[in-house]
Image: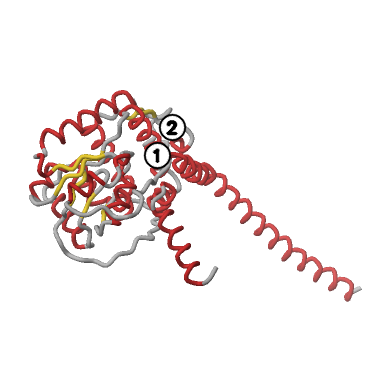
Amino acid sequence: MDHAESADHQRTWLEDFRGSNLYLTFRVAFGLNLDEGAERVEDLQILSGALAKSGSKSIKSALETLGFRVYHGEDCASEDHVIAARALEGQEGALETWMAKVKAQGYNATVDVPMAFFFEELMELYPEAKVLLVVRENTTSWAESFAAQSRAFSSITGYPFNWLIPTWKDFTGPFSQGLQDNLDCQFGEVWWNSTYFPWIRTVWDYEIDTARCAQGIDAYVHNVRTIVPQERLIEMSVTDGWKPLCEGLGVPEPDVPFPRLNSRSEIVIGKTIIRSIAVAWPFLALLNIFIVFGLLRFCVSTLCGRRSSKGLDTKKKLA
């Protein structure tokens, strides 16, 4: 394999990794960012009507293939979660400030939550933009998939991740409230109150009423269909391929397969990694204490041993 082929292979691998749940896990938990793009200033052209686990990662990749720069939920979670939390809390001017920052960063399309919660407000801010509604055929499996991803990231609100990203806890509360307000998702507490015992969250999953969440998703989809004028609405599923997306945007279909990203197995891998780190953290701290104690004991015993040896040598000389 020559250098050019190796570079192409590496590029493809990075693109695949960027489209995975594993990358999302590391980006949110540790701030890893492999995204690059030339900044350009223009109004948003596509507004998110795509909820989590509707295929938003595949849609993001497809829109990037069509030349858009897409602001996804992972961008919000890793970079703009503080201002997003203010918008979710309904603070005056927060949404406008948030979107101005998104625009200044060169994005011209949004996909995923929490942006989808504001589709109606954003329609007024950007009257020329299309609303992209992404759906799945089975709402029940959609809600179950959403619940699985939510549980995978539950550990980030506890130790040690709240030390790495101390502002993350300021976002999780408003975001959970946004899910409840927009999708009627009810989060059950784990064992004791996880606010006071955050480490427990890494061991016991909280519960989500998936049946109620599925009803909330149906209501959200119906709401978008009702509010958005037909000429501004693009509705599709990732199984539809390029046709509805390209027809809605008035662009030709690219001669490449439609992206298929974000498998559920990656959620399990990401959850296992994060949970293992979180569970091991207190024991690693104890291990460090024992190591430090052992080093101090070694140093003290070594110094005392040297002093004892010097004392014996002095006694021998005197004798």
Q: Would you say 197 lies left or right of 182 here? A: right
Q: Name the quadrant of the N terminus.
A: bottom right
Residue 35: mark in rendering? none
Residue in view at x 30 percent, y 53 percent: 75
Q: Is residue 273 left or right of residue 207?
A: right
Kindly indicate the quadrant of the structure image that contains residue 193.
top left
Q: What residue sits 44% from the left and 45% below the top?
A: 159
Front in this rendered view, residue 11 or 308: 11
Residue found at the very far bottom of the displayed protein: 317
Q: Regarding mark 2 in the picture, which secondary structure is present there?
A: loop
Few, some or many residues within 10 Å of mark 1 (<14, 14–19, 20+): some
Pick whichever, 263 or 78, lies toward us. 263
186 vs 75, nearest the viewer: 75
Q: CA distance from mark 2 to mark 1?
A: 8 Å
The crowding category of the residue bearing disc 2, from other C-alpha atoms within 10 Å (few below 14, some 14 to 19, many at least 20), is some
Q: Secondary structure at mark 1?
A: helix
- Residue 137 to residue 39: above or below: above
**Which quadrant of the figure has residue 196?**
top left
Q: Residue at x 13, y 47 (%)?
A: 122
From the top left corner, tell me how far across and down residue 77 is, in percent: 31, 49
Tags 2 and 1 in contact by the CB under 8 Å rule?
A: yes
Q: Position of residue 57 (x, y in %)?
A: 33, 47
Pointer 2 or 1: first along the chain? 1
Counting from the top left corner in percent of width and height, residue 256 is at 34, 54
Mark 2: amino acid: Asp
Q: Which residue is mark 2?
A: 205
Q: Which image quarter holds the C terminus? A: bottom right
Residue drawn at x 37%, y 33% is 147
Amino acid type, residue under disc 1 in the picture: Ser
Q: Which mark is residue 154?
A: 1
